[in-house]
């Protein structure tokens, strides 16, 4: 048996999900947690019987730690990732990797220079239904891709944006935006996962029904590098909230998912269609999408798979399943949509990060 890969987690809001996933992951062991807020830190350290650090710099000096999961506020990610890479630690980076493509590129350079691995979180990419759709699209079963449309009609109440761990949310400086950068980026990333790189965008964003700085609703039009067109809308205003819906169609068929389950699958052979709907069809009992209203209702299975993949990537000396260059593209598109909203013009997106 190879010796376990030792993980530490910094930032214990969503970071508690990382702890749970690491504790379940094959080949991984949680050895330390770090948060400046002791009220969060101490119960988590006790629950997992691991070391507790209030100082990130001190934690990075711990030779027992092989991997650091960075789960702090979004605008801290790249800086903290660079510090960890320079300390020789492999990385797990929560979404968004950071709030600008430039910061992410700096992290990419630091990771390459240190020769460490960096796995990024976009957990919907690990969902079996989404993987099966992508395989079908790549196999040409949709034909020529024509349209991909995503909507995320969620709700977040005032409490989400208040208190010591809330006021950074929906700020331009620390969250990098509002419903698009924080929540809708998952939906956008799936539109990229299914359709490939986005070449140019037009967008609008505004604050409608919250006392926040960045937007609580954004809409965007996407032109893909392959010529397909897409749309995205994302909000934290919808009462009652609803599930994420993604609709894709091409010259030979179409699909629609609701909360990552198939609601329509019309591509490939009759046998394909029946098999996909049997495996991934949306059944009435499974349509309540708790995460549409509760941010802590995120499951840990996707995180677990990304963590187990990172353990194997370290052992096999290969790239992780979601590398930095892939995760960067969603941030490139988000930033282009915001720029379009600010300038009232269509904006070209850099397409070197898929
Ligand atoms: N993948 C998902 O579905 C998902 C869900 C929720 C949040 N997130 C992401 O996770 C990140 C954190 O979000 P959150 O909701 O947990 O935020 P949060 O504010 O609840 O938690 C952040 C924690 O980081 C700690 N922290 C900040 N700077 C620190 C430092 N220098 N040293 C030690 N601790 C420090 C804070 O004290 C806080 O406890 C964000 O980037 C967010 O976008 C991802």
Image (cartoon, helix red, strand yellow):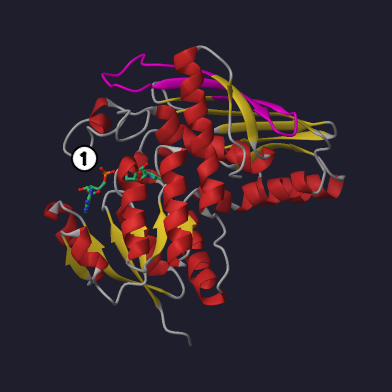
Question: x%, y% of residue 252?
Answer: 85, 34
In this rendering, would 241 be left or right of 272?
Answer: left
Is 52 rendered above or below residue 269?
A: below
Q: Quadrant of residue 351?
A: top right
Q: Residue at point 31% right, 72% down?
A: 65
In this rendering, would 283 be left or right of 239?
Answer: right
Q: Residue at point 52% right, 46% down?
A: 327
Q: Residue at point 56% right, 48% down?
A: 326
Disc 1 target residue: 165
Is 320 rendered above or below residue 188?
A: below
Farthest top residue in view: 344
Question: x%, y% of residue 86?
Answer: 35, 63
Decide which of 152, 214 is in the foreground and name it.
214
Query: SS of the residue at dot 1?
Result: loop
Decide which of 242, 310 is in the foreground and name it.
310
Is 100 rendered above or below residue 15?
A: above
Decide which of 133, 110 is in the foreground and name it.
110
* Residue 288 visible somewhere in the drawing: no
Q: Report the magenta residues as a range.
A: 203-232
Decide which of 207, 48 is in the foreground and name it.
207
- The crowd level at tag 1 (other Cα within 10 Å; few <14, some 14-19, many 20+) is few
Mark 1 CB within 8 Å of ligand 1: yes
* Residue 258 visible somewhere in the drawing: yes
Where's the C terminus, which quadrant? Answer: top right
- In this rendering, the count of numbered labels is 1
Q: Is residue 241 magenta?
A: no
Question: x%, y% of residue 135?
Answer: 73, 50
Q: Residue at point 44% right, 16% down?
A: 342
Question: x%, y% of residue 188?
Answer: 55, 35
């Amino acid at each position: 048996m190879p010796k376990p890969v030792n993980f530490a987690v910094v930032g214990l809001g969503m970071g508690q999900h990382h702890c749970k996933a690491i504790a379940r992951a094959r080949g991984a062991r949680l050895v330390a947690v770090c948060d400046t807020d002791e009220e969060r830190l101490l119960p988590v350290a006790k629950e997992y019987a691991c070391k507790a650090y209030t100082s990130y710099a001190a934690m990075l000096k711990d030779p027992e730690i092989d991997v650091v999961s960075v789960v702090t506020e979004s605008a801290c990610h790249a800086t903290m990732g660079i510090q960890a890479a320079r300390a020789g630690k492999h990385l797990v980076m929560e979404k968004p990797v950071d709030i600008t493509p430039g910061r992410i590129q700096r992290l990419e350079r630091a990771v390459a220079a240190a020769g460490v691995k960096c796995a990024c979180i976009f957990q919907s990419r690990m969902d079996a239904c989404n993987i099966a759709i992508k395989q079908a699209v790549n196999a040409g079963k949709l034909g020529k891709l024509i349209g991909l449309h995503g909507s995320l009609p969620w709700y977040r109440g005032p409490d989400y944006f208040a208190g010591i761990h809330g006021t950074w949310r929906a700020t331009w400086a620390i969250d990098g935006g509002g419903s698009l950068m924080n929540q809708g980026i998952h939906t956008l990333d799936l539109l990229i996962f299914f359709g490939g790189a986005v070449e140019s965008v037009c967008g609008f964003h505004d604050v409608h029904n919250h006392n926040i700085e960045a937007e609580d609703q954004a809409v965007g039009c996407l032109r893909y590098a392959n010529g397909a067109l897409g749309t995205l809308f994302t909000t934290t205003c919808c009462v009652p909230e609803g599930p994420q819906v993604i609709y894709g169609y091409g010259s030979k068929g179409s699909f629609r998912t609701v909360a990552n389950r198939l609601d329509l699958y019309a591509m490939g052979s009759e046998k394909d269609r029946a098999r996909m709907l049997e495996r991934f069809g949306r059944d009435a009992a499974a349509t309540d999408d708790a995460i549409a209203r509760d941010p802590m209702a995120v499951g840990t299975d996707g995180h677990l798979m990304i963590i187990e993949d990172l353990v194997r990537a370290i052992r096999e000396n290969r790239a992780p399943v979601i590398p930095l260059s892939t995760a960067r593209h969603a941030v490139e598109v988000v930033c282009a949509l915001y720029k379009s909203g600010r300038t009232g013009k269509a904006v070209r997106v850099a397409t070197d990060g898929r």
